[in-house]
Amino acid sequence: MSLDLQTKLGVLFAVGGVVAGVLSGPLPGRFAALSLLVLGFLFYLCYRLAPKILKFEASQLPGGWSGTVAFKKYFDVFFFLWLVFWILTYTDLLRL
């Protein structure tokens, strides 16, 4: 099965959001603001590593590849999955 480039980018940012959520969940109360730092850093990391991981050129995408394009198209998926997995991890740790 072959996926197009935009689908692969969506999956990459979705996985990045899951990883960011799992890493953000265990941060204790005083350091909860670091969750947003983890969110921003891992989104930036996904943006910078996407061309290397998926081996594509900016010209292959309509509109090119820039931070603005990545933010407009993929931040919602990244943020939603970060939020879901942050809540799941945080809630699961409260039960311990």
Image: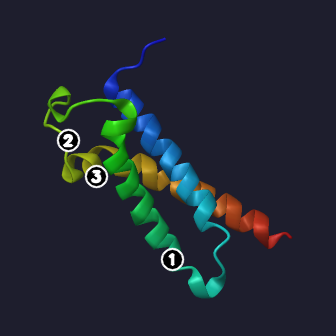
Give the quadrant of residue 65: top left
Q: Nearer the viewer, mark 3 or mark 1?
A: 1
Residue at 43%, 46% (x, y): give it.
77
Does the rendering let one see residue 25?
yes
Q: Sort mark 3 into few (<14), some (14-19) or many (20+) by Cα contacts within 10 Å.
A: some
The location of residue 92, given as percent across then percent down, is 77, 63
Residue at 26%, 49% (x, y): give it.
72
Q: Sort mark 2 into few (<14), some (14-19) or many (20+) by Cα contacts within 10 Å.
A: some
Q: How far apart are marks 3 and 1 (CA)?
A: 20 Å
Between 21 and 95, the one nearer to me in the picture: 21
The location of residue 56, given as percent across then percent down, is 27, 29
Q: Which structural element holds mark 1? A: helix
**Badge 3 or badge 1: first in the primary sequence:** 1
The residue at which mark 1 appears reads as: 34
Q: Which amino acid does label 2 sit on?
A: Trp
Q: How far apart are marks 2 and 3 (CA)?
A: 10 Å
The residue at which mark 3 appears reads as: 71
Residue at 57%, 53% (x, y): give it.
19
**Badge 2 or badge 3: first in the primary sequence:** 2
| Marks 2,3: beta carbons within 8 A | no
Q: What residue type is labelled 1?
A: Leu
Residue at 21%, 46% (x, y): give it.
69
Q: How far apart are marks 1 and 2 (CA)?
A: 28 Å
